[in-house]
């Protein structure tokens, strides 16, 4: 009886969670209909609310916004808008921080969350998956002893939205061949959903190692010496 219950849970739990997440997304995006006049709402035409209309409206708004801003006039409007927001004290700090994060993550040319890594954390010999978010810059880079450093994000399990930000020497991280999606699934599932082994090919047909993918340096425990060694007579 127990194995039948477990088998049923394995089928229904992912399905229920998927439906719940989709319903949450659709319900949230349907709130955009509140921006339209009452006479344009679906219940005015059809006598009832239609789930998903807000999703279509959101996609249309995003596409139109992208088309309008992909020209000189649109770029200037964005500059004027950002300059206006930059003069409002509280709004300026919030908007600039959110914009920097979104530009870093969503930009197609950005390097944030483009690579999955193996790092030793929280101690030497204990390995975990991390994601490269960039490289240190500015004052931080000048003050670091090792100039060849990478910035990584170590997510927590099973909630990857919280984690730790670390700056490590590039030689101490191991670049993985798995995609970011596969690594994220591995973290969220607590290691139960193993990604495919893309580096299993050996011999003459083996692909060359990826640039930057090197073994981590061994951890050497420092040897502490006493400041005042005892003499032989004592």
Image (cartoon, grey):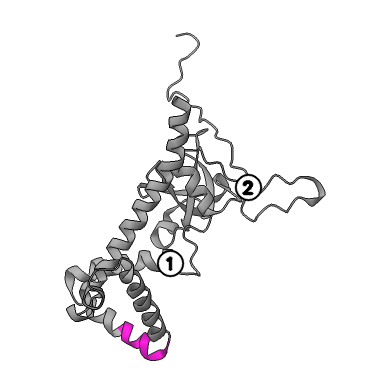
Residue lying farthest right? Answer: 204
Residue at image position (50%, 31%) is 222
In-image side of 35 versus 159 (left or right):
left
Residue lying farthest top? Answer: 233
Residue at image position (33%, 75%) is 57
| Mark 2 residue element | loop
Q: Is residue 75 visible?
A: yes
- Figure quadrant of residue 97: bottom left
Residue at image position (28%, 79%) is 82
In-image side of 3 versus 94 (left or right):
right
Residue at image mark 1: 106
* Image coordinates for residue 9, horizontal then vertical, percent: 42, 37
Residue at image position (45%, 52%) is 144
Q: Which numbered disc, 2 or 1, marks the residue that appears first in the sequence?
A: 1
Q: Nearer the viewer, residue 153 or 44?
A: 44
Residue at image mark 2: 214
Density class for disc 1 (Cα within 10 Å; few <14, some 14-19, many ≥20) is few
**Magenta span of residues:** 71-79
In-image side of 66 versus 117 (left or right):
left
């Amino acid at each position: 009886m127990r194995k039948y219950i477990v088998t049923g849970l394995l089928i229904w739990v992912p399905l229920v969670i998927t439906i719940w997440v989709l319903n949450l997304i659709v319900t949230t995006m349907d709130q955009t209909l509140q921006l339209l006049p009452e006479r344009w709402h679906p219940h005015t035409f059809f006598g009832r609310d239609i789930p998903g209309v807000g999703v279509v409206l959101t996609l249309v708004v995003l596409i139109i916004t992208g088309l309008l801003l992909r020209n000189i006039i649109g770029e200037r409007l964005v500059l004027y808008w950002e300059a206006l927001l930059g003069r409002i004290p509280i709004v300026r700090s919030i908007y600039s921080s959110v914009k920097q994060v979104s530009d870093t993550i969503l930009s197609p040319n950005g390097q944030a969350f483009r690579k999955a890594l193996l790092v030793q954390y929280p101690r030497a010999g204990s390995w975990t998956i991390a994601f490269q978010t960039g490289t240190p810059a500015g004052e931080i880079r000048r003050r670091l002893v090792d100039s060849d450093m990478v910035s990584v994000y170590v997510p927590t399990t099973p909630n990857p939205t919280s984690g730790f930000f670390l700056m490590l020497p590039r030689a101490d991280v191991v670049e993985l061949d798995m995609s970011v999606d596969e690594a994220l699934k591995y973290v969220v599932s607590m290691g139960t959903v193993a990604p495919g082994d893309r580096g299993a090919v050996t011999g003459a047909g083996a692909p060359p190692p990826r640039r930057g993918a090197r073994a981590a340096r061994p951890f050497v425990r420092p040897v502490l010496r006493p400041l005042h060694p005892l003499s032989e007579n004592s």
